[in-house]
Image (cartoon, rainbow, N blue to C red):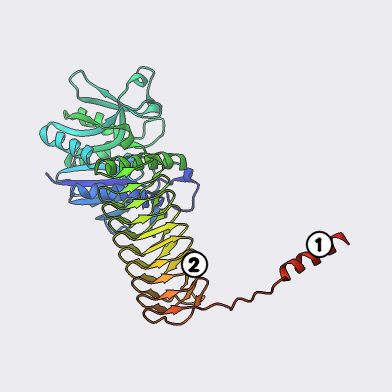
Amino acid sequence: MELEVVILAAGQGKRMRSVLPKIFHPLGGKPILDYVIETALSLKPQKTVLVLSPILEKYAFSRVSATVFQDPPQGTGDAVKCALPKLNCNGDVLVLFGDTPLVTKDTLDRLIQKKSEDSSLGVLVLGMEPETQSGYARLKVSSEGYLEEIIEDKDANEKDKDIRICNSGVMLVEGGLLKDLLPKLTPNNAQGEYYLTDLVKLARSTGRKCGYVTGHPDEFMGINSREDMAQVETILQNRWRKKFMAEGVTLRDPASTYFSYDTDIAHDVTIHPGVVFGSGVKIETGAEILPYCRISESHIGPWAVVGPFAHLRPGTKLEEKAEVGNFVEVKKSTFRKGAKAKHLSYVGDTDVGEKANIGAGTITANYDGFSKFKTKIGAHVLIGSNSTLVAPVDVEAGAIVGAGSVITEDVPQDTLALARGRQVNLEGRAKLFRDEHQKKKEA
């Protein structure tokens, strides 16, 4: 059966109090709307039509079949009517909401499956049983289990408000029926809008049956405010935490670990408290991320160790058993097998050779205020503490850089490089210095 999807995303999002349109706010590192589009596309529909507000006309949405604009906004029924010219309506039409990103493919599959098993059903909706029903439309169900009516909360009487099953907004409608019934919607309600939910009564008036499938309330939480977004983020993060632990990842404190939508973690990885992942992170088997690290667009190899308090920025690659320790920042650099920078260093635009050791306080000075330059550190190199390597520079295999050196020229293989001022000891001058200052204080 042919399936088409309509995504309603014409809301203004005024309660977000932001210059950024609501559907573009990031959730787990990805815009809210992207989750809905990806879920829709996972169903392999023939068409996906996005209904937007005119304020979004300047944006491109390449992954959908078509975009249409609802102006002025007159309710969900009117929004779907705007999409109608772009639909074939030869099969079923699924209506989703652009600010409700947690609906799962599994739940939608159950909805579609029920429709395919009972051809008498003209309309199917997704329902839920939230802890608090206030604010939600209610699903009035017959003794035979068919859906009789969807009653909006503002139009519900006291008896209707006792109904526990609520409407999520997601609806699956037979295409031909949708085309016939949308023009019959009227705004005779408390909001003065065209309710898509009125399709149930209209379908039943033509002799068609209506049904429902329930899902978990978390799936249907819409985002209208920053508070809503925080709650949805928590639900999403908890899903990912459970997924990773089920796949063999150890989370020492799941609630304090934050993932991105594309975080890729192998089994037997251990992640300690307070770790935050940006997008584009891949971690291989056996690696360990110690507390309070921030990692983005990085590849961490098997049995590598990161942290605590490390910052891996985009373009970082750690090979097998490499170590980046506390208060080390790495950007666009590769640490070869067994290479280490254990503490208090900045390593940028650098290739660190196998089993090289970078001492505390080392800086690769990769930027001159205009351009970035590369540093190359060979295998088994030892960089002494508090050294600065001024790029571009090549410290070849087996070389040693003495502590406190400022290296501005290449260091040949197996060479000891020293680049610092000569030490001078002036005997007795420390005592003389103190005595002179003591006399000044007493004067």
Secondary structure under tag 2 reads loop
Q: Examine the rendered structure and indicate whether residue 338 appears above or below residue 370.
A: above
Q: Residue at x 20, y 34 (%)?
A: 123
Q: Quadrant of residue 180?
A: top left
- Kindly identify the amino acid type of the residue bearing the numbered disc 2: Ser
Q: Examine the rendered structure and indicate whether residue 424 appears above or below residue 304.
A: below
Q: Position of residue 31 (x, y in %)?
A: 37, 51
Secondary structure under tag 1 reads helix
- Circle 2 is placed at which residue position? 385
For the N terminus, give its image quadrant.
Answer: top left
For the C terminus, give its image quadrant.
Answer: bottom right
Q: Quadrant of residue 253?
A: top left
- Kindly identify the amino acid type of the residue bearing the numbered disc 1: Gln
- Circle 1 is placed at which residue position? 438
Q: Is residue 306 left or right of residue 141?
A: right
Dot label at residue 179: none
Mark found first going from the N terminus, 1 or 2: 2
Whether residue 15 is visible to the viewer of this picture, yes or no, is yes
The residue lying toward the viewer, choosing from 304 and 421, is 421
Q: Position of residue 399 (x, y in %)?
A: 39, 76
Asked if labels 2 and 1 touch by Cβ distance under 8 angstroms, the answer is: no
Q: Position of residue 238 (x, y in %)?
A: 34, 39
The residue lying toward the viewer, choosing from 255 and 397, is 397
Q: Residues within 10 Å of mark 2 (few under 14, many from 20)?
A: many
Q: Examine the rendered structure and indicate whether residue 327 appears above or below residue 164.
A: below
Q: Residues within 10 Å of mark 1 (few under 14, many from 20)?
A: few
Whether residue 69 is visible to the viewer of this picture, yes or no, is no
How far, Cα to Cα, is label 1 from label 2?
Answer: 35 Å
